[in-house]
Amino acid sequence: MEDLLLHVAIGLVLCFAYVNGFHDGGNVIATAVCSRSMNPRRALIVGGLAEFTGAIVLGTAVATTMAEGIFNVDLLEELPFQMLCKMIIAAVCGGMAWNLATWALGLPSSSSHALIGGLVGAGLVTMGRPGVALESLVRGVALPMLISPVIGILVGYFLFGIIKILFSRAHRGVRHLFEVLQRPCLIFLAGSHGSNDAQKSMGVIALLLASGRGELHGHLHLPDWVILSCAGALALGLVTGGWRMVKSVGYGICRLEPVHSFASQVTAASVIVTASLLGGPVSTTQVVASSVMGVGAQRRLGTVRWTAAKNIAYAWFLTVPASGVVAAAAFWAMERLVD
């Protein structure tokens, strides 16, 4: 039964990575497609390849944070392995349920928040309040996620202000320059998304494998198959879906021209890749959407559809508690149905 639960847990984590790809990955290509800078099919393919590459080459600092920064390792070691597998299964189910619901509604919510909410909810009903490492959770996980959207708005606002000054007297043909610049920017943004989001799934699998070997207090080893499978699942998710989120972010917040898309992409990619290298898990959805808001506000406050932004914010705030409740209910059900 333990082997079966382990394989089910790993399979569901990879399913989460796939859902993450088509849920959040759409945000990566949204501005380039909606500003008419890139062909949608080409943007999907380029974005998918860049996500896969970024997840492999930009380190595993975020995976370590996810594996070590949420639960109390001492209590986790005392947990029977079968119960740990049930906890991870419940957590991932909670995150996926919320992702699929918001995807169906076209609301860009955070897959990262959904996964963390699921892990915390399942951890609380499994081990109680002491099982969640509150200090490291706030410092290493929650704080980067709360700060990154604010940074995205500010950097987007000031970056586009600089661009406006530099190109205030440029010929209208400068539009073509920013269309061309979209391609390397898209690769940079997709690679940064792959590096941050795929590592969250890697960290959960690393936690399962380390627990099975009794190595939770040692250095968490990430086998190559874990890195490649999580990177591949995320990239495949982007290539096969994500159009609902493209419309919500690309059209729903403000009208985008190539120059606005360029500023948004540079902003979002810079924030995300910095967080990845520092080991901070952040939400690509939040960072991309907030960078679009910052660029739009620099153009003119009235150009931002604040009603749409408000709906996105509501989805962000509801994500952690909603996915946590679903995960807790899923664990409760499994405890009664699976011996």
Image (cartoon, rainbow, N blue to C red):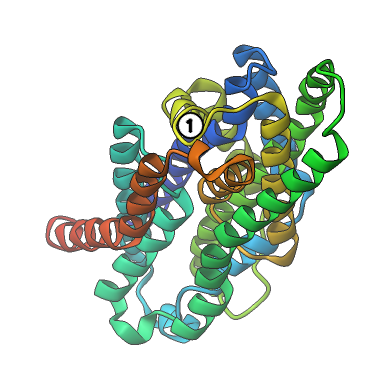
Q: Is residue 271 visible?
A: yes
Q: Nearer the viewer, residue 261 or 61?
A: 261
How would you rate the neighbour count of disc 1 (Cα within 10 Å): few for under 14, some for 14-19, many for 20 or more? many
Query: Percent x, y for residue 171?
Result: 86, 20
Q: Amino acid at mark 1?
A: Phe
The quadrant where residue 256 appears? top right
> What residue would you read off at disc 1?
22
* Residue 70 higher or lower than 334, as above or below: below
What residue is at 55 percent from the left and 29 percent from the top? 238
In the rendered image, the quadrant that contains the C terminus is bottom left
In which quadrant is the N terminus drawn?
bottom left
Q: Is residue 215 visible?
A: no
How many numbered marks are there? 1
Vertical position of residue 252 compared to residue 72: above or below: above
Measuring from the top left, give residue 30's x and y in whole percent.
57, 29
**Image point 65% across, 28% down: which residue?**
48
Q: Secondary structure at mark 1?
A: helix
Judged left or right of residue 23, residue 234 is right
Q: Residue at x 53, y 81 (%)?
A: 136
Q: Locate residue 225 relative to residue 179 in the image: left or right.
A: left
**Residue sitting farthest toward the left:** 336
Q: How far across and down, in percent of the image, does residue 211 sit?
A: 50, 69
In terms of depth relative to the viewer, which is nearer, 240 or 202? 240
